[in-house]
């Protein structure tokens, strides 16, 4: 799913290259790949934070933040340094001040009409705010855990997202739309698409999955035995959301589309780890040939999943460099453009992964071989 998410996002950002027609519809909705990342983060990070409580322990804030810093900051700062020291590396000339990137406030303060370089870091800002707040929320809720209390928080976050997007759209954006102001689309990006408080739906869906897996094992087991139902329900929910987003900047998609899409993506994530689905793949692709095909597909997506963060940080810049230096292939469109841009992006991401990301991850594992404090072992070694 992580591999699918990054490929989906890349197709969206490379629409200008006139990729093969088979990618038209996936590319049109490729922005949803970011929401798939949010669901995955909610599920994986939520599971990590809640796991210690199953053993009667508590999470270590120090350990969690330390591990997140080593996971996120080295590659991010390396790419950010390139943006400020090598102007030709930028996919657009305008660049926000460094302090906005260093404080992860770019998604709140960006002037998108002027500063579009490295603008895709908005989603990393959302993730960083999530990493900061969720552990604190878990600590508070787990002091006196109650199902009703957790459900109330979940519903409150869901309702808040619906209400705030609706309010902003009706009172700030619709007047621009009715007046025929082209600034509507820029303002929509800045006021609804980028801010953390309007994009909590995917993270919430992932955290709910983590809660069910951790604290409602019987419910989770029943879900895992209904993999096909999860898959069909997820596809139906995502299909309905895509229909609402035929007008990507419309009111219905803005208010209802995001939670419906997140629900669908959450169901798809749950189905992807269902033994029923995994067993179904083996029955569809039986024999030695099927086994080789499944193995090849798994390795291919594993590579993309491993490189996902480095690809996320660099793919737009590499696409820009391909247009600058291999313009004849990119302008030709079709499979030649696809091969050049995707190959170059994978090569650049591999370089970043092996020179920066992986060394710091290995250093993190060495530093966290011992717990930070008594009782923090579980959170110090989990990732």
Image (cartoon, grey):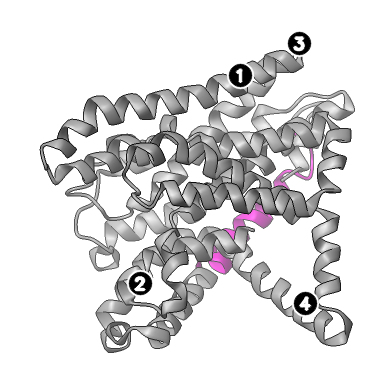
Q: Relative to 85, say whether 209 is above or below.
A: above
Q: Is residue 141 left or right of residue 103?
A: right
Q: Quadrant of residue 139?
A: top right
Rendered view: 5 above or below 154: below
Hey, which quadrant is residue 107 in on the image? Answer: top left
* Farthest-out residue, top: 144
Which stretch did the figure color magenta?
352-372
In this view, 207 is above or below 348: above
Disc 2 is placed on an element classified as: helix
Residue at mark 1 to residue at mark 4: CA–CA distance: 42 Å
Provide the secondary structure element on which disc 4 rests: helix
Q: Of the residues tagged 1 and 2, which is closer to the observer?
A: 1
Q: Secondary structure at mark 3?
A: loop
Q: Of the two numbered discs 2 and 3 on the same chain, state the one appearing first in sequence.
A: 3
Q: Secondary structure at mark 1?
A: helix
Q: Which mark is residue 319?
A: 2
Identify the residue shown where x is 54% and y is 71%.
350
Q: In terms of sequence position, does the residue under pointer 1 or pointer 2 come before the other?
A: 1
Q: Earlier in the sequence, mark 4 or mark 3?
A: 3
Q: How many C-alpha atoms fall within 10 Å of the one at disc 3: few (<14), some, or many (≥20)?
A: few
Mark 3 = which residue? 144
Marks 1/4 in contact by CB < 8 Å: the verdict is: no
In the picture, the disc for residue 153 is 1
Lower sequence index among marks 1 and 4: 1
For the residues marked 1 and 2, what is the alpha-carbon distance in whole angstroms? 41 Å
Among numbered discs 2 and 4, the one appearing first in the sequence: 4
- Pick the quarter of the image with the N terminus: bottom right
Is the C-beta separation of discs 2 and 3 under 8 Å? no
Query: Mark 4 highlights which residue?
Result: 295
Residue 165, given in percent of the width and then of the height, sits at 37, 30
Label 2 and label 3: CA atoms lie apart by 50 Å
């Amino acid at each position: 799913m992580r591999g699918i998410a990054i490929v989906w996002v890349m197709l969206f950002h490379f629409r200008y290259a006139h990729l093969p027609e088979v990618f038209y519809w996936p590319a049109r909705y490729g922005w949803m790949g970011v929401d798939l990342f949010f669901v995955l983060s909610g599920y994986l990070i939520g599971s990590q934070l809640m796991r210690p409580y199953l053993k009667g322990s508590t999470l270590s804030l120090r350990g969690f933040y330390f591990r997140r810093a080593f996971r996120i900051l080295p590659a991010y700062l390396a790419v950010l340094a390139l943006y400020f020291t090598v102007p030709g590396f930028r996919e657009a000339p305008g660049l926000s001040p460094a302090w906005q990137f260093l404080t992860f406030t770019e998604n709140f303060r960006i002037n998108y009409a002027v500063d579009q370089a490295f603008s895709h870091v908005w989603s990393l800002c959302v993730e960083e705010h999530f990493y900061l707040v969720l552990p604190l929320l878990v600590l508070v809720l787990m002091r006196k855990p109650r199902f009703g209390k957790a459900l109330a928080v979940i519903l409150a976050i869901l309702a808040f997202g619906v209400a705030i997007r609706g309010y902003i759209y009706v009172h700030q954006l619709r007047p621009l739309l009715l007046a025929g102001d082209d600034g509507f689309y820029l303002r929509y990006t800045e006021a609804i698409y980028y801010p953390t408080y309007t994009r909590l739906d995917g993270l919430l869906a992932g955290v709910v999955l983590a809660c069910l897996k951790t604290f409602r094992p019987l419910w989770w087991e029943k879900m895992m035995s209904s993999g096909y139902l999860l898959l069909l329900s997820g596809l139906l929910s995502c299909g309905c959301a895509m229909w609402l987003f035929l007008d990507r900047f419309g009111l219905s998609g803005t208010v209802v589309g995001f939670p419906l899409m997140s629900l669908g993506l959450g169901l798809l994530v749950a189905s992807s780890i269902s033994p029923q689905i995994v067993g179904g793949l083996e029955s569809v692709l039986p024999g030695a040939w099927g086994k080789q095909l499944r193995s090849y597909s798994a390795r291919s997506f594993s590579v993309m999943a491993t490189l996902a963060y480095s690809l996320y940080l660099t793919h737009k810049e590499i696409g820009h460099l391909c247009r600058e230096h291999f313009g004849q292939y990119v302008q030709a469109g079709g499979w030649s453009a696809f091969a050049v841009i995707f190959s170059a992006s994978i090569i650049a991401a591999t370089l970043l992964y092996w020179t920066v990301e992986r060394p710091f991850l290995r250093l993190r594992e060495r530093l966290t071989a011992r717990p930070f404090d008594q009782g923090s072992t579980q959170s110090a070694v989990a990732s």
